[in-house]
Image (tube, rainbow, N blue to C red):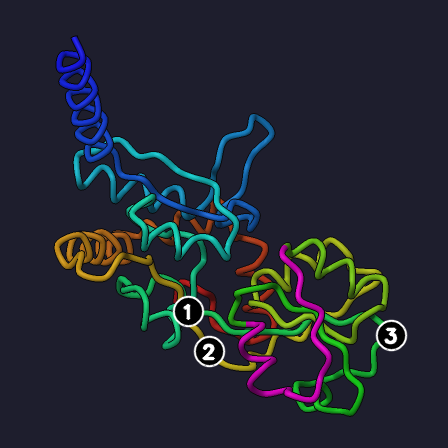
Amino acid sequence: MKCLRHAILVLACLLCSCSKKDVLVIGTDATYPPFEYVDEQGVIRGVSVAMGEAIAQRLGKPVEFQNINFDGLIPALQTGRIDLIISSLTASEQRRRSIDFSIPYVKTGLAILVAKDSSVRSAEDLKAPGRKLAVRIATTGEQWCREHIPGAKLVALDTDAACVLEVVNGTVDAWVYDQVSVMNYHAKHAGRTRALLAPLREEVWAVGLKKGRDDLKTLVDEVIGRMKADGSFSRLADQYLARERDMMKAQGLPFVFE
């Protein structure tokens, strides 16, 4: 009887393993609209979801999205919990040491959100003595501040909303984050903030893959290349990013999909 139970357990594990391989599991931190967010019905949506669905369709597999806090995405990929990261992830040199990336699909830059009456007008102003900056943990904004503003006191927080609140309440001098987020949060708090969108440095976003998955990387690159060529990203911009596109063009800045 013990042997039979053991055989049944092994078979069940094998079946679970097979079914897992038949699903493309994508990790995303769904707190970043319009790229990845949870709608009123509790469903993860956004540009990243559309990309993931296109990749899964090319693979001929169903797709499962897992909502994971941003600093847990790379560990989840490395341990095999997920197959891909599609979560507005900057393809930085530091991250390339631990994971691989697809070709880029977004070109953006780090920007600054400050309080409306702040004396900060540029990145150079952040270097003044006694500056206090909000940063989101494990982001390139945090990395940039640690590298370029070593004298500042950093308030490291784990959500965008917490960082914005620090700026709105005037408890920090600035928040360094990507352009799209800075634009969106400024729009929500237009009476109390200013957006300094001139990029501190340019960055690209790409899909994250576990090292050694060259077969999957080739396919993901193919899908991204097709979406660029056939106008899919332009249509996604119409659906999700029309306001941001107009704001960037009004300031003479290239749009993220250009």
Q: Quadrant of the C terminus?
A: bottom left
Depth order, front residue of 161/248: 161
- Which residue lies at the image location 35% right of the left edge and 62% below the top edge? 206
What x and y, as percent, mark residue 118?
83, 77
Contact check, label 2 and label 1, Cβ < 8 Å: yes
**Labels 2 & 3 near each other (Cβ < 8 A):** no
Q: Position of residue 74 (x, y in %)?
A: 39, 57
What whole-number distance in Å separates the C-alpha atoms at marks 2 and 1? 7 Å
Can you tell which mark lies on residue 202?
Answer: 2
The label shown at residue 107 is 1
Amino acid of disc 1: Lys
Identify residue for label 3: 117
The residue carrying pointer 3 sits among few (fewer than 14), some (14 to 19) or many (20 or more) residues within 10 Å by Cα, namely few
Mark on residue 146?
none
- x then y, percent, for residue 22: 19, 32
Where residue 215 sits, quadrant-wise, is bottom left
Whole-angstrom CA distance, mark 3 to mark 1, is 30 Å
Secondary element under disc 2, as helix, strand or loop, is strand
Relative to residue 127, is residue 137 depicted above or below? Answer: above
